[in-house]
Amino acid sequence: MSGYRNVIILILAICLMQAAASFLGVITPVGLTELKSGETLTGLIGAIYSTGFMAGAWAGPALIGRYGTIRLYAAAAAITAVCALAMGMVPGIAAWGAARVLQGIGFGLLFASAESWLGQAVPTDRRGDMMGFYYFLSRIAGLLAPFLAFGLSALDPRGLNWVSILLCLSLTTLCLTRREEPAPPAREVMRLPDLFRLAPSAVTGCFLAGLLNTGTLALLPTWTSTFEIGGGGTSAAAWAAAAAAAGALLVQWPAGRMSDRVERRLVVAGLSLFSGAAALALAAGATRFSEPVVLALLCLWGAGAFAFYGVCAAHAIDRAGPGRIPQVMSGILFVWAAGSVAGPVMSGVAMSLGGPQALFGLAAAGLFLLAGIMLVRSRVRPPPVVTEAFRPTEAPSGGLPVPGPGAAGPT
């Protein structure tokens, strides 16, 4: 348990920040609907948020090197909180769009700075275990946060005030940790071709996590539009999303622990095959299955689909070495966000051309492709060998990204 005690304060701070991001991710589209923005404009604002997140994640290592981890985190948290307050004071489509761009940049910087600090405290031989624990808690925070607005209009400033409260609590928690702030990393940004050559499996897995998971979740309410469970409509969509999230909560931590004992790419392959089989069943028989069976299959799909990102991130850290962890993990965040921008578009086109069954058909095809890539790569290139114990005081920085619903769409 000593490993958990060493990082629990940092994890708590990031979970509070994750809760703020998740809260915004839920309340923003609902608020834009109340402002009569229309589906196209709402989707555009979501896309520019993801673009801002990509920019923040990409610039993270250089800004950490210039200003330091805590100072950058404090500045990004303040800007993001101010934008949330401004959304409550000026409930307009243009103002919300501008605020979401800045919030995307802010959350990209927050994840890059906080998680790079967390990475230096994670023992090498327990990386998957600790990442699974981290993602497990962050998913709980992301699921619970939207209930803070229960009974409030999305345009009610009291709801948006919660975002500022959560960010301030996150900043306070981070500043009060007794763990020494990591030394600033080198300021250069790793180019995407270099990142791909370093860890092609991790880059591919994280991109497909953004592409497939974000796209499927974005179209899930449309897919469940004819369901009757919970009274239909948004209630049916909420049940479907909750079923997928429940599967992820059950598998995330055990999958991380397993990847410390079994080659990480084989764990990703297994999760992908498992999830792909559930997605294929949903694509082939969702209209014939009873709704409880569909929810059970969604739980199985989410168990694999939402768990492999963390294992891919651990694999990227394994390849990075302590000197390049911030650059590598910021690049991984950028790649995931790029997939999350393209995912809803691709899933929407698939449903338009192939009908509702094409949504999970596309997901199944992508998951089976990922499984094949991981199996081939595990044969072509052996896993890295850790030759010395991890010493937190000597590692300059690191990163364990956890994109949540508010951070770009996953979680």
Image: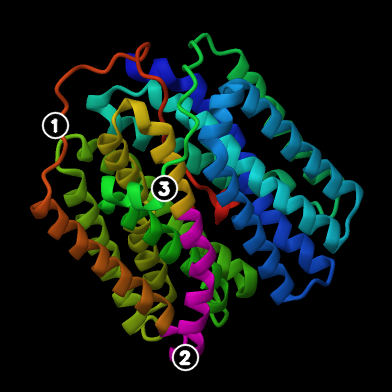
Q: Nearer the viewer, mark 2 or mark 1?
A: 1
> Does residue 199 appear in the picture of this structure?
no
- The quadrant of the picture occupied by the N terminus is top left
Q: Is residue 351 magenta?
A: yes
Q: Is residue 381 magenta?
A: no
Q: Quadrant of residue 62?
A: top right
Circle 3 sits on which residue?
Answer: 191
Q: Nearer the viewer, mark 3 or mark 1?
A: 3
Position of residue 187 measured from the top left corner of the image (x, y, whole percent) = 50, 31
State the residue at coordinates (83%, 49%). Answer: 87
Disc 2 residue crowd, few under 14, some 14–19, many 20+, Cα 10 Å: few
Stretch of the chain drawn in magenta: 336-357
Instruction: Tell me how many marks there are.
Output: 3
- In the rendered image, the vertical position of residue 281 relative to residue 63, given as above or below: below
- In the rendered image, the vertical position of residue 387 relative to residue 190, given as above or below: above
376 or 30: nearer the viewer: 376
Which structural element holds mark 3?
loop
Q: Quadrant of residue 29?
A: bottom right
Q: How far is the residue under mark 3 from the one under mark 1?
A: 25 Å
Name the residue at the right extreme: 89
Position of residue 246 measured from the top left corner of the image (x, y, whole percent) = 43, 52
At label 2, the amino acid type is: Leu
Closer to the N terminus: mark 3 or mark 1? Answer: 3
Circle 1 sits on which residue?
Answer: 385
At label 1, the amino acid type is: Val
Name the colouring of the figure.
rainbow
Disc 3 residue crowd, few under 14, some 14–19, many 20+, Cα 10 Å: few
State the residue at coordinates (70%, 76%). Answer: 40
Position of residue 114 measured from the top left corner of the image (x, y, whole percent) = 53, 29
Circle 2 sits on which residue?
Answer: 353
> Does residue 112 appear in the picture of this structure?
yes
